[in-house]
Amino acid sequence: MADPDLCTKFEKLLKKYECKYCYFIKWILIPEMIDGRYFCEPGSREFVELDSIDVEHLDRKTSRKNVLHRVMARVNFSGETCSFPLIVKLPKQNIMETTLCGSFLNEEMFYSKMTLNYGTDGISKCYASDLGRFDGQAVIVLEDLVASGYKQVAEKLNENHLKLCMKALATFHGKGLKLKAHKFPIFREFYAKLSEPIDWLHLNTSPGSVRTSELMVESTLDNPECLDTSLYSVLPVEATLSEKIRAKHNITSKLEFNDFWTICHGNFTRSNLFFRYENGYPSDVKVIDWSTMRYCSPSIDFGQILLENLPDDNNLAKVKAFCQNMLEIYLDAVKDVYLEVDRELLERDVIAKLPFAYGMIENRMLRKTGMMLRALDQLGSFD
């Protein structure tokens, strides 16, 4: 039989050499969540106790202010062991030490408050979202989508993927527009607490200007040589279209507020999408990383996912038909959620604002900018 004192010393030694985040997860967070019955179904009276915990670092290149861990928590329910694959997100600072970054506050608010009004369809299951209950440490605990059978797509999304994306995005936007119309005080509380000011997209896009949006800066950190300070500095299109774009730009250099503004994801790209498949086809999509939420035109979200995944086809008629089809799917889904929306006006607004979405992504897809601009022209964005 093992010496109890020796086991205790060995346990203390393990704790000593664990990183502070692993230590917090293994010895504080998960045990307290089990004691608080966070893994139990509502109304459950089963006896629960900790079985074991595995923790590993999950590196994510785009996560600069938070640390991610993949966790397997095994919990005994009245003697039966159940496993919970989790992703734990922690800010790199303790809430008791300094002010949390706005991006973490965005996401914590989304899971702890906004989902009460928006619902939980299309997102990861959240087990805990708190700013200090666990030993003063802010934390978000989500289901591990990979362990649940979801996958990311490394290459361009095809039409089947995009249809799911458009419906998911439209559902989120539609719920926001409906909440804004019928329960404005609640909606106002949400958008007023977002980390970026509401005019974050009122960008000065004249030659020589500098983008200051946090999202813009982060999107170019991985490839700083691509940072361009002019929205349309060198247009890779024919002269007639170039002049048409510049004329439009001269009279519309700011994304002006209107009634269609709502809370948007802010970085609705395939890096934040997980898909489940049935018979080789995508059947469901989950959206992650709500830290980039912004109050702006829904065209920003729609335009990012559309323009970054245009089909590889030089036939403009086919590209236009593709874009119109995606827009129809999006508008129909918004209408399904928010019946009172003026579908025609929303369509006009989305098309008119698409150049701003192009401005968000031009530096990340320089080789595709010509086709993007031509597609926007086909839709009427520069008219």
Image: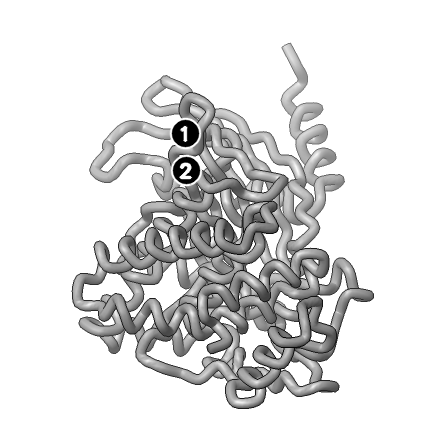
Q: Which residue is mark 2?
A: 34
Image position of 326 with respect to 190: above or below: above
Look at the image and tell me whether residue 139 can be seen: no
Q: Which residue is mark 1?
A: 49
169 lies left or right of 269: left
Quarter of the rendering containing residue 13: top right
Disc 1 marks a residue whose amino acid type is Glu
Q: Residues within 10 Å of mark 2 (few under 14, many from 20)?
A: some
Q: Residue at x 25, y 77 (%)?
A: 185
Given residues 23 and 105, the one toward you in this image is: 105
**Under tag 2, what secondary structure?**
helix
Q: Which mark is residue 30?
A: none
Q: How many marks?
A: 2
Residue 87 drawn at (x, y percent): 53, 41
Q: Residue at x 67, y 18 (%)?
A: 3
Q: Split into 4 quadrants, where in the image is the N terminus?
A: top right
Pointer 2 and pointer 1: residues touching (CB < 8 Å)?
A: yes
Q: Residues within 10 Å of mark 1 (few under 14, many from 20)?
A: some
Quarter of the rendering containing residue 127: top left
Q: Residue at x 52, y 89 (%)?
A: 251
Label 2 vs 1, first from the N-terminus: 2
